[in-house]
Amino acid sequence: MPDRLLKVNAYTTLDLVDATARGHDFENEALAVLNVTAPREDPDHVTLQLELDNAQLDSLPAHADEVTLSATEARTLADALYSYADDVDDATDR
């Protein structure tokens, strides 16, 4: 990714995922980096970061989106991810 804003290394959660940027008058598909992190010292939140490959985007400038979650919010998100992953597993096992 040219002009990458997020650092990508061996600790990056998912360094190549399919993503879509949607707006009222556009939709661009691109590869993306998805990372989950927390401060190393005295962690007080979880950060979820997403950056789409700006070389594949026609409608947006280079940017990264970031969400700061409390521990409870991160667990709620994790539970939802597990639940939907189970649904996908069940559907593909048919």
Image: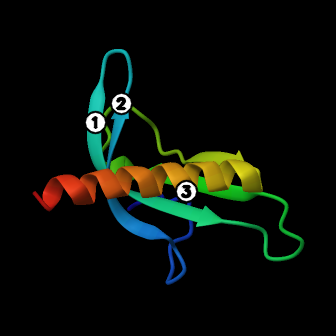
State whether residue 37 is above or below residue 84. below
Answer yes or no: is residue 31 visible.
no
Mark 1 is surrounded, within 10 Å at the Cα level, by few (under 14), some (14 to 19) or many (20 or more) other residues, namely some
Q: Nearer the viewer, residue 75 or 5?
A: 75
Q: Secondary structure at mark 3?
A: helix
- Does residue 87 appear to the left or right of 14 in the view shown? left
- Does residue 50 appear to the left or right of 30 in the view shown? right
- Does residue 54 appear to the left or right of 13 in the view shown? left
The residue to which callout 2 is attached is: 59
Give residue 64's position: percent from left, percent from top: 54, 48
Answer yes or no: is residue 17 visible.
yes
The residue to which callout 3 is attached is: 78
State whether residue 67 is above or below residue 4. above
| Residue 28: assigned label | 1
Disc 2 residue type (three-letter): Ser
- Does residue 69 appear to the left or right of 52 in the view shown? right
Quarter assignment of residue 27: top left
| Quadrant the C terminus occupies | bottom left
Task: Give the CA separation, mark 1 to mark 2.
Answer: 7 Å
Disc 3 residue type (three-letter): Ala
Sequence-wise, which precedes: disc 1 or disc 3?
Answer: 1
Give residue 9's position: percent from left, percent from top: 51, 79
